[in-house]
Amino acid sequence: MTTKLLTALLLGTSILGTAGLAHADDVTLNIESWRGDDLAIWKDKLIPAFEAKNPGIKVVFAPSAPTEYDAALGAKLAAGSAGDLITCRPFDKSLELFKKGNLADLAALPGMENFSPVAKAAWQTDDGKSSFCVPMASVIHGFIYNKDAFDKLGIKVPTTRDEFFAALDKIKADGTYIPMAMGTKDLWEAATMGYQNIGPNYWKGEDGRAALIKGEQKLTDADWVAPYAELAKWKPYLGDGFEAQTYPDSQNLFTLGRAAIYPAGSWEIGLFNTQAQFKMGAFPPPVEKAGDTCYISDHTDIGMGLNAASKNADAAKTFLSWVASPDFATIYANALPGFFSLNSSPVKMEDPLAQEFVSWRDKCKSTIRSTYQILSRGTPNLENETWVESANVINGTDTPEAAAKKLQTGLDSWYKPGK
Amino acid sequence: MAAETRPKRPFRWHIGIFLAPALLVYTAIMILPLAGTLQLSLFRNIEQHQVFVGFENFRTLFGDPNWSVNFWNALRNNVWFFIIHMLVQNPIGVMLAALLSSPRLRFAAFYRTAIFVPTILSFVIVGFAWKLILSPLWGVAPHLMDLVGLKSFFTPWLGKEQYALTALSLISVWQFIGIPMMLIYAALLSIPEEVIEAAECDGITGMSQFWKIKLPLILPSIGIISILTFVGNFNAFDLIYTAQGALAGPNYSTDILGTFLYRAFFGFQLQVGDPNMGAAIATMMFLIILGGVCVYLFLVQTRLRRYQF
């Protein structure tokens, strides 16, 4: 009922909308997005930059609320009133739209060659033949630390695991700071900032991830259990009552200067820059011994695709090629520090913390979160279970082996690789 | 001859017309969605089409350990949630009502209002307020316990598997204690003066008056409250969702049928929603509640009637 009503309303507005614009000679492109936060950046920076180069094409950024985006977009696409350009969620949600024929194949789009296979993986069919969204940005995991605290205690930035735990011990012994700001209450912190953050160093990034999808490796293999064993060792370094510490609690603990190290995602940079009163630095997940290849989680998060039913497909493709260009990447990455362009050509960024994060791309190998592609399609959902088990491991209610076994059993129950 | 043919009684249209508005509204917003849910639970989405599969969804729900373990866990938690309410909320509610109805109590209206206020608060406010109160970092609970020397008894209750559900049940009790209190209070006030006076003439006063005269007379109200609590608890969702999130952590220890239904129906994060399985869970919730209400109506209420005037 509501969907139909919504559809009717949307249809109504789209007809009225087009009627109003009919007199203009310019082609108008509408962008569907859930990133309402970025409205100002699009209006003031990105769209003027594009329109200056491409006279005759007007672009309107029309976001909806994040929680309503998927449902509203589905209704608009069904009614034929959706915008020409569609902001893509990574993996299955966009893949579903492509399979339904709502997104056009962009494999041949000029500009797509600017992206690495890992960057494109989030918006490809499982066989990798069709790409349907231009990758826009990714987030990188690592650790943000309180530089003042490190200086005061005379701690050097750790590069190996031994140095990392030695640093934690030193902070704990000193007692001024909580060594690490993380809680397990919201579950996802433990999985996303914990397991997916330090894990790639153990399972060798893309190699391990691909082997897991192919079924050559199991979550019960040593490389996949080891990150849990390390997480279990984090417990004594977390704050009092970390079991009931929520994600905002962790953020506040760190920005108030009460904790020394924050297992982070780069999306925090914007907020931390405005809130923290001390100097901050960042380091990638420590490796086993100095000189080892490091791997980082450089997770594809947002892309843009073309509505297959768009009447202005040519203009939209021009726009998408621009989105794939270094010009766009530079403006976007600087406007939103912490959301990094996936473009292969290096982007110059002003923010020092963001620069630090992105510099790891040169020395480390990038991968995406292990549970996102293909493996979270069934029941039980691997991503959700990873949240629960990561928290269990840190809480000490499950051993690393038991947690890994539970995940693998759940995955085995529906995922049969190679079939 | 004419006298023999009885005048035909006109069809009483007005009954239908007067019933129609309520019946239509009730059908549209209650019966149709319910029937729709029951119907949805018998279908399954195969290759983008809804296909009739009979009771397959229920077989999955009870036969597939990936579903059944979660279902029984949610049901068990829900029963515990209900038990806490029955053991804590309703006795305290009766006690508060008995105290409030005592004629010697001063500021009765103030207490009544103060105790009832949490009931009208939004779940979101209650969930967040208690999360903050119990927060080990900034909460007032650890500080207050420290003041009376009980700091060692403080643990992050909402984050511990063994305490989280009980803590949430008690938060819910705190919020809803006003309802049994008000209903019992009304029932106590409606006890006729003659009965009380007769009891006093026979020398039954004070506590024994409450146990022997008043309590039996308010038993029907207690029955109604129990059934309201039962229905409310087995439909509960919002408090757990606001305090613990849809995954009802830690380790699903606070997962109740409502949150389990939410995850199945709408999906969560990368989990794609499955309306058909969700409808199957909703159907089970409906049957559980229906069963409980039937037990009450046919077994309990028939016995309670004896005490009514």
Image (cartoon, grey):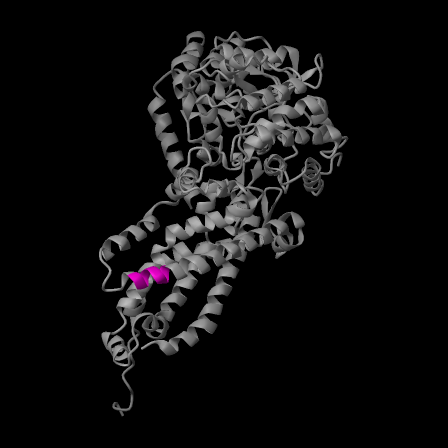
Predominant secondary structure, magenta span:
helix
Image quarter hosting the C terminus of chain B: bottom left
Residue at 26% x, 77% y is B200
Residue most extreme to the front: B149
User: Quarter of the image holding residue B230?
Assistant: bottom left
B280 shown above or below A70: below
Nearer to the camera, B55 or B231: B231
Nearer to the camera, A96 or A100: A96
- Measuring from the top left, give residue A100's x and y in whole percent: 57, 34
Residue most extreme to the bottom: B1
- On screen, residue A235 versus residue A402, left or right, reads left
User: Quarter of the image holding residue A231?
Assistant: top right
Residue at 29% x, 50% y is B114
User: Quarter of the image holding residue A165?
Assistant: top right
Q: Is residue A186 visible?
A: yes
| Magenta residues, start to end | B93-99
